[in-house]
């Protein structure tokens, strides 16, 4: 083997792709049902956008970005997440002038230079949504409904929703002070470099892979410093979740790895709550639109890691169909029958998915392969008979001769027959 895929990346192959497509389909349907419209942004953006939005002190910006200079000397970065780019596009396209709430959703690859392991990759995929333009706590709850609804449709049952607030700047300012003092008191339990970084944003200590779990119980939590407005927003979110029957657990240490979050933050876990088991993360980011140069506009979003979601997908998920509905196989013997075989396949595709066997192997081998394909019928086009084809019912193995000109009518009649298996 001359080439191998880059470390931390994956090929998604059949039949695994069926699970991917099923999951993407369910999310698309769920987004449609809540009124979210799709958006696709470039894979790379000017580096500044992420430094500013995700935060200079975040792990993502300090250690994980794929940053490069293009031939024109511009610094570009493969997107480590999609929210910053969505907000950039929202402003650049003038969507902020529309008014009301703008609801957007996306799916695609993200890139982080992280240590690869199960559930953590350098190229991974996220599906997510953003609702831009409202400070109403009800939209926080709608966001949670969207993701939970999609996950339930996929067959997830025991979901574990973790919820916290990281407050607005007015709550965080006093909190940062007490947190910094507490971090100072930890002495040499943290190294010099990390200490410097936490001076910029001490909240980062909670999602640090090195220190978060180990030290969190020695540190104060934000709930003691919340302003009345921030506390009220959080209370209403919790009441609305209760009122709409969504179970959650309050987690005072949940802060999320990106600096732009304000107020509500949440994560969704499934099964064991290990470090790599968060399937979804989200929260409010009321300052990001303004920081990206737009008007003061509150917003909230979430993203789901597709690799992790698909690895955790219940075996019984009804959303997953194997081989998406292959109905017919056209077998073809001999070069001279090729044109007729291609025409027959075109006719059959008007009724259902059709695959042509153009392998040139024997009739017997082609029929054997068709028997295993899951299709319901095989049409055999032979050089020796220029006017008619053989219709083979793959369930009963019965064969019927059908004139080429009658094929469409014949297929349609089998399609509508009571057993559908003529
Ligand atoms: P974040 O953008 O960090 O809030 O992450 C949101 C979700 O993306 C997480 O809950 C994971 O499911 C997924 N995710 C984040 N980083 C990775 C990664 N390196 N590999 C695979 N999935 C990831």
Image (cartoon, rainbow, N blue to C red):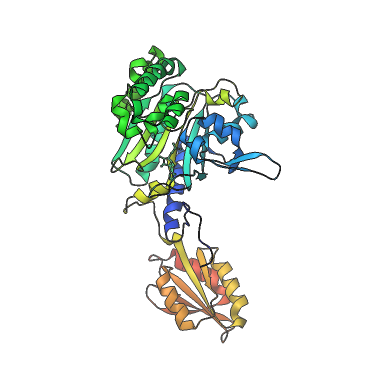
Measured as percent of width and height from the top left, residue 139 is found at 44, 26
Q: Which residue shows up at 69% across the image and 40% down it? A: 73
Pick the quarter of the image with the C terminus.
Answer: bottom left
Tell me where residue 90 sits by quadrant.
Answer: top right
Q: Where is residue 91 in the image (x, y as percent from the top left)?
A: 61, 29
Q: In the image shown, does 244 or 123 lie closer to the viewer?
A: 123
Quadrant of the image where one finds ligand 1: top left
Direction from residue 261 to residue 272 in the image, left or right: left
In the foreground, 249 or 65? 65
Residue 318 appears in view: yes
Residue 134 in the image: above or below residue 207: above
Residue 18 locus on image (x, y percent): 43, 56
Q: Nearer the viewer, residue 273 or 93?
A: 273
Q: Can residue 246 be seen in this view?
A: no
**Residue drawn 47% across the image and 55% down it:** 10
Classify residue 324 by image quadrant: bottom left
Which residue occupies the extreme right position in the image?
72
Above or below, 224 against 27 in this view is above
In x, y percent, where is residue 298? 51, 23
Q: Which residue lies furthest to the top in this view?
A: 228
Residue shown at the point (33%, 47%) measured from the top left:
155
Query: Total of numbered circles in the picture?
Result: 0
Q: Which residue lies most toward the bottom here?
A: 384
**Is residue 286 shown above or below 65?**
above
């Amino acid at each position: 083997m001359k080439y191998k895929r880059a470390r931390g990346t994956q090929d998604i192959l059949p039949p695994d792709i069926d699970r991917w497509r099923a999951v993407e389909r369910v999310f698309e349907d769920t987004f449609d049902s809540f009124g979210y419209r799709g958006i696709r942004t470039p894979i790379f953006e000017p580096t500044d956008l992420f430094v500013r939005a995700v935060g200079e002190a975040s792990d993502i910006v300090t250690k994980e970005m794929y940053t490069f200079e293009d031939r024109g000397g511009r610094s570009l970065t493969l997107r480590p997440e999609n929210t910053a780019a969505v907000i950039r596009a929202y402003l650049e396209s003038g969507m902020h002038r529309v008014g009301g709430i703008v609801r957007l959703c996306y799916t695609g690859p993200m890139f982080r230079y992280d240590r690869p392991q199960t559930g953590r990759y350098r190229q991974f995929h996220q599906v997510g949504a953003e609702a831009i333009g409202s400070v109403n706590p009800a939209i926080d709850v709608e966001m949670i409904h969207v993701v939970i609804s999609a996950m339930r449709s996929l067959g997830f049952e025991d979901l574990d929703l973790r919820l916290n607030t990281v407050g607005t700047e007015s709550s965080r300012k006093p909190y940062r002070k007490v947190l910094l003092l507490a971090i100072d008191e930890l002495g040499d339990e943290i190294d010099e470099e990390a200490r410097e970084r936490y001076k910029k944003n001490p909240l980062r200590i909670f999602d640090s892979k090195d220190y978060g779990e180990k030290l969190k119980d020695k540190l104060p939590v934000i709930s003691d410093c919340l302003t009345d407005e921030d506390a009220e927003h959080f209370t209403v979110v919790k009441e609305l979740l209760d009122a709409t029957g969504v179970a959650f657990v309050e987690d005072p240490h949940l802060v999320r790895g990106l600096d732009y979050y304000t107020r509500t933050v949440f994560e969704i876990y499934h099964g064991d709550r290990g470090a790599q088991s968060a399937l979804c993360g989200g929260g409010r980011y009321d300052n990001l639109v303004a920081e990206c140069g737009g008007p003061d506009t509150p917003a909230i979003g979430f993203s789901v890691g597709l690799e992790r979601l698909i690895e955790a997908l219940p075996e019984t998920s009804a959303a997953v169909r194997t081989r998406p509905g292959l109905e017919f196989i056209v077998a073809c013997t001999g070069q001279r029958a090729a044109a007729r075989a291609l025409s027959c396949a075109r006719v059959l595709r008007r009724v259902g998915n059709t695959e042509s066997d153009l392998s040139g192997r024997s009739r017997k081998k082609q029929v054997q392969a068709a028997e295993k394909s899951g299709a319901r019928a095989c049409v055999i086009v032979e050089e020796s008979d220029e006017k008619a084809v053989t219709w083979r019912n793959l369930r009963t193995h019965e064969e019927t001769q059908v004139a080429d000109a009658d094929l469409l009518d014949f297929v349609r009649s089998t399609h509508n027959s009571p057993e559908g298996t003529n």
